[in-house]
Image: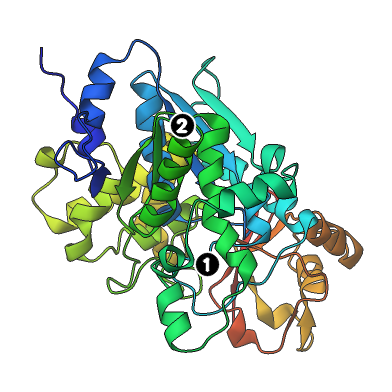
Amino acid sequence: MVQDFAWLRRGTVEIFPQPTDADNETESLEKRLANTHRPLRVKLGIDPTGADIHLGHSIPVRKLRAFQDAGHTAVLIIGDFTARIGDPTGKSEVRRQLTQANVAQNAQTYLDQVRPILDFDTPGRLEVRHNSEWLSGLNLGKILELLSTMTVGQMLAKEGFAERYKQENPIFLHEFLYPLMQGYDSVAVAADVELGGTDQKFNIAVGRDLQRHFGQQPQFGLLLPILIGTDGVQKMSKSLGNYVGLSAHPSDKYQKLQGTADQLLAQYFELLTDLPLDKLPENPRDRQMLLAWEVVRQYHGELAANEAKEAAKSGGQEGAVPEFSLAGVSQFPVKLAYLLNVSGLCKSSGEGKRKIQEGGVRLDGDRISDVDTTFHEPSELHGRVLQVGKNKFVRLVV
């Protein structure tokens, strides 16, 4: 009987190796899935280099859930050790190294944000691991063994390194260790499959090489596309402002997604939902509203999705989020802690500072952790949603 692997292929750019590849592989991932007598171990690594993630980050997590639903074991690796280096892929300069405290705080927020996607409850369906478990204990001998598996020429072939070398931008030796450490994660958890964006092929291939070096059966790599942002031009990115945050208010999610450009709708439905692609509404406006409703439902439930839809109909972009007029602020510049007080989100500026220090304050879904954060003009804040905890929101207006 031929199994239907539509769930596996949906949104997938590449699965490697294939039986036709030059390394004489004789088995495809589909054949492995069809013939296995045990759940496969499917790895996804997430480096908590920031506090918040967006819909673009959700794509491999959703594929991980698809493997769970097919009966396999998701191995979610929190890269609390590798995050302190930072993946150099595509970077034109060395990344700022994070402290252990930064990484620990970010890691917890990541888990909170992916909880609506993954099955955390079914026994045997999820392992959450931290790669400090095995990487922090590597001695110099083991590190030298890892380094001996790759040449400088191979490393310079990695995306970004060749350009930096050509442009005489510094490449630090600890950056060379990153793909080896990520690859060693696959050895440590005995991965059968590793998921990642198309920019992760080099790192996943290193994992295959290291598994072979340590006597394991090499993993398959499954690559997923990089999501185009809401501007319809560049990849979704917080720095570009074209993103939809997983922790954003339901009404904000709905408002942004109901305006999705027509040329993006097919990709967004394929990558962000499980809806059958051949049964979508013909009218583009109906497709936009269905997309917005379905994504909000996934993260917040049907009630919140219906409320966000009704709020969008009746209240425009303000939706169901109460407003606070910045005219109530006596003068600018203003510190965030004071703003939390006068807006009614906190009982005092002191409580506001504590909430910031505890990581409970967000602006447009982005966590703010600096108690000295200051805003100089009302225009910096107009239209933005200020949040404390999970249930307190105000939209700031001039």
- Report helix, strand or loop for mark 1: loop
Taking the spot 71% from the left edge, 89% from the top edge, the residue there is 376
Q: Position of residue 181 (x, y in %)?
A: 58, 50
Q: What residue type is labelled 1?
A: Pro
Taking the spot 72% from the left edge, 63% from the top edge, the residue there is 98
Taking the spot 57% from the left edge, 54% from the top edge, the residue there is 147
Q: What residue type is labelled 2?
A: Ala
Q: How crowded is mark 1: few (under 14 residues within 10 Å), some or many (20 or more)?
A: some
Q: Residue 191's mark? A: 2
Q: Nearer the viewer, residue 183 or 129?
A: 183
Please identify the quadrant where the N terminus is shown: top left
Q: Do the residues labelled 2 and 1 touch (CB within 8 Å)?
A: no
Taking the spot 68% from the left edge, 38% from the top edge, the residue there is 134
- Report helix, strand or loop for mark 2: loop
Q: Nearer the viewer, residue 53 or 202?
A: 202
Residue at which label 1 appears: 88
The answer to whether residue 304 shows anywhere in this view is: no
Q: Position of residue 152 (x, y in %)?
A: 48, 67
The answer to whether residue 266 shows anywhere in this view is: yes
Q: Residue furthest right?
A: 350
